[in-house]
Amino acid sequence: MSTFYKLIGILLILGGLPLFWTPIPVGLIMIAVGLSLIIANSNTARGVVRRQRERHHGFNDWLLKAEKVIPHPFARILRRTDAPPRA
């Protein structure tokens, strides 16, 4: 079942990429939900996202914004990868 969720997550990310630049942030929501599905089902993905959030502050800021607009269960999953506060 986790493979199914990972596949749905990948499809949501791929579908959200072209919609990212539209005036209504549908692409942002689709990408964040897809990423949440992958993170929820993969320890490796959680570690990769956490490291990327620590390295790339813009990516971290983008995910922090996404956590505010996506449904609560998905936002909770994204929060599991939060980077430590910047010094």
Image (spheres, grey):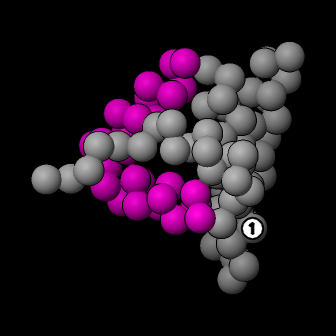
Residue 62, compared with residue 85, is above or below; it is: below
Say left or right for 64 vs 69: left
| Image x and y of residue 69, in percent | 65, 66
| Image x and y of residue 37, in percent | 71, 35
> Residue at 29% across / 43% down in the picture?
84
Q: Residues within 10 Å of mark 1 (few under 14, many from 20)?
A: some
Residue sitting at the far bottom:
23
Nearer to us in this view, 5 or 85: 85
Looking at the rendering, which quadrant does residue 24 occupy?
bottom right
> Residue at 79% across / 18% down in the picture?
3
Q: Secondary structure at mark 1?
A: helix
> Residue at 35% across / 43% down in the picture?
83
Q: Quadrant of the N terminus?
A: top right
Say left or right for 34 vs 62: right
Find disc 1 in the rendering and name its residue. 26
The magenta stretch spans residue 62: yes
Nearer to us in this view, 18 or 54: 54
Start-end of magenta stretch: 43-68
Residue 13 appears in view: no
